[in-house]
Image (cartoon, helix red, strand yellow):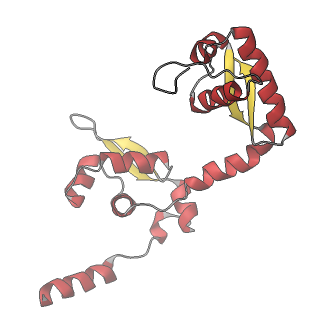
Amino acid sequence: MNGGSGGHKAVNSDGRETRRALEAILFLADEPMSSGALAQAVEISRREVDDLLRELAESLEERGSGMTIRALAGGWRMLTHPEAAPYVEQFVLSSRHTRLTRASLETLAIVAYKQPVTRHQIAGIRGVNSDGVLRTLVDRRLVQEVGRDEGPGRAVHYGTTSEFLERLGLASVSDLPSLAPHLDDAAIESSSG
């Protein structure tokens, strides 16, 4: 058997290489994989695939892995271990709290101070298309649709969410700091330049 590219069997006497290959495939798969598809990928029988995956699942459980392999929805799937769920959930939720980009902060400030505001108005103020940034802010639940224009096209109006207020420790948007002192400084700097 050569080590070149193309299909080759990952079979050895103890099945270790084949188990490794199956584990790697399941790690990458975004949906349950049938025994038939896995058998074809590693060039062994479906029964051997099922046996090796059961062994692998037992091995993961015995060593206290954060991952598990389960047969579900007509195939095999690698999942996070149920006992790790609270930690995984905390991690996923905290990743929403990652720092915002400068473009996101600019867009969020425009929405916060000008709400309700349309995409077109945001783009006019920023001078660039802000659709992607706006989608990110909606996904992070900092901005939401708050209404629509009555005119042609019925443009969506955006405003901040209660989560935005919670994160900033504000009771309402009226508690946002005034922009006037910052605008005065900017006007002074631009007139003296």
Residue drawn at (20%, 87%), measured in percent from left and top?
A: 189
Which image quadrant: the C terminus?
Answer: bottom left
Residue 189's place in the image compared with 13, above or below, is below
The answer to whether residue 110 is left or right of residue 189 is right
Q: Residue furthest front?
A: 1
Front in this rendered view, residue 129 or 71: 71
Which image quadrant: the N terminus?
Answer: top right
Q: Is residue 73 visible?
A: no
Front in this rendered view, residue 13 or 21: 13
The answer to whether residue 59 is left or right of residue 187 is right
Residue 173's place in the image compared with 1, above or below, is below
Counting from the top left corner in percent of width and height, residue 67 is at: 73, 38
Front in this rendered view, residue 36 or 2: 2
Counting from the top left corner in percent of width and height, residue 2 is at: 52, 23
The answer to whether residue 116 is left or right of residue 41 is left
Counting from the top left corner in percent of width and height, residue 18 is at: 68, 24
Residue drawn at (68%, 9%), measured in percent from left and top?
A: 45
Labels in figure, total: 0
Counting from the top left corner in percent of width and height, residue 39 is at: 63, 13
